[in-house]
Image: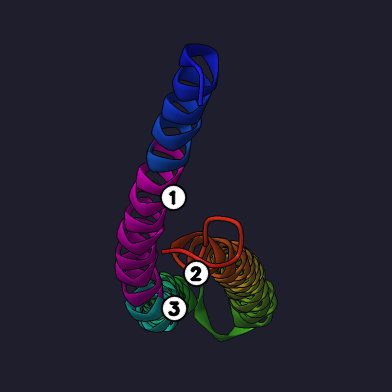
Amino acid sequence: MGPLEAIAAAQLAISVGTSITGVGAERQAGDRKQEYIKQQQSLLGGADQQIGELAGMKTELATDIYGTGLGQSMFKTGQDLYGLTRQGMGLSSQVGFAGSGQVDTQMQRGLEAGVQSFGFQRQGLQDVLGQKLMDISEWEGAETGRIQSEQARLEYEMKEAQAQSKKKFLGIFG
């Protein structure tokens, strides 16, 4: 073997050795990627459960706010109706029996207006609650979809990392 052939053989040996070492490093990188992906998958598994819990807490809060608003509206309407009734009774006693029919009519209109006002307030609160519940449902769906998409991406990356960690040099070494 001449000097050129010896140099070529040495270069080939160095190249093969470098390639084998490179494959080993690539396999180690694949193993590290797999560990990282497993950690990410574990975190996502817990996040999926937390979304349901958060949606439940948000729903509970929205219904509590609705209940508080409804209670306040009922209390105010009750106070208004009580005040109107007292006022009407006071006027009836002052105008006497002859004028009490007119006072009764005005009181009846006032009571109806108070009840109607409460109905509008209640409907408004129900509309707000319905919108909040819809927003919560949309949020939960979006977050669940995002997590499922991330899980699918991680599954793909895991397969790629597994293939990388099993890589062989020329199909025989490593």
Q: Is residue 146 above or below residue 58?
A: above
Mark in the foreground, 3 or 2: 2
Badge 2: residue crowd in 10 Å (few <14, some 14–19, many ≥20) = some
Residue bearing the label numbered 1 = 23
Q: Is residue 49 above or below residue 167?
A: below
Q: Visible in this render: residue 79?
A: no
Residue bearing the label numbered 3 = 48
Residue type at mark 2 is Gln
Residue bearing the label numbered 2 = 162
Q: Secondary structure at mark 3?
A: helix
Region in magenta: 18-44
Residue type at mark 1 is Val
Q: Quadrant of residue 156?
A: bottom right
Q: Main secondary structure of the magenta part?
A: helix
The answer for how far apart the CA atoms under marks 3 and 1 are is 37 Å
48 or 149, which lies in front?
A: 149
